[in-house]
Amino acid sequence: MSDLTPESANAAIQRLLLSSITPAMAEETEDINRISERIRSCVERVKVEASEGAALVAECAPHGRTMVAQAQKTLADLEALAVLERLVGEIYGADCSG
């Protein structure tokens, strides 16, 4: 296992973030430098997807429930990452978490 540094913690969060979002969302948010802002942007995008899925459920579209379930899982993952990112910021200082 490598040393625990702000850089290694941020790299781990970045890796987990990329495994939690779609490739399209990763591409759409790749220009956001601060991890906290990128996570926040992804949360907002997933909330839109969840809303769209809920609208499809209301219209009895068969894939609406799948969209909502996936969005809920992704939101839970992103919220967990946001907690870890804040913890890293508190441990290493706010300037190290971005």
Image (cartoon, rainbow, N blue to C red):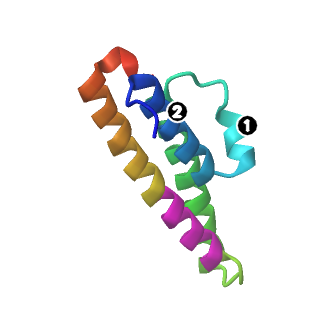
Q: Nearer the viewer, residue 86 or 8?
A: 8
Q: Nearer the viewer, residue 88 or 71?
A: 88
Segment colored magenta: 65-75
Q: Position of residue 13 (x, y in %)?
A: 48, 39
Position of residue 54 in the picture relative to residue 23 (left or right) = left
The answer to whether residue 62 is above or below residue 38 is below
Q: Identify residue type, mark 1.
A: Glu
Is residue 12 shown above or below 32?
A: below
The answer to whether the residues at label 1 and label 2 have Cβ atoms under 8 Å apart is no
Q: Residue 29: image x %, image y %?
A: 64, 33
User: How many labels, in total?
Assistant: 2
Looking at the rendered image, the quarter that the C terminus falls into is top left
The image quarter in which residue 82 lies? top left
The mark nearer the N terminus, 1 or 2, is: 2
The 10 Å Cα crowd at callout 2, few under 14, some 14 to 19, many 20 or more, is few
Q: With respect to residue 61, does 1 lie above or below?
A: above
What numbered label is drawn on residue 11?
2
Closest to the observer, 9 or 73: 9
Q: Main secondary structure of the magenta part?
A: helix
Helix, strand, or loop for circle 2? helix
1 or 2: mark nearer the eye: 2
Question: What is the three-letter code of the residue carrying label 2?
Answer: Ala
Question: In the image, which disc is placed on residue 2?
Answer: none
Q: Which residue is mark 1?
A: 27
Rendering coords of residue 1 (x, y %): 45, 40
In this view, the residue in front, 69 or 18, is: 18
For this orientation, the residue located farthest to the front is: 1
Q: Secondary structure at mark 1?
A: helix
Q: Is-magenta flag for residue 12?
A: no
What's the residue at 50%, 65% (across, down)? 73
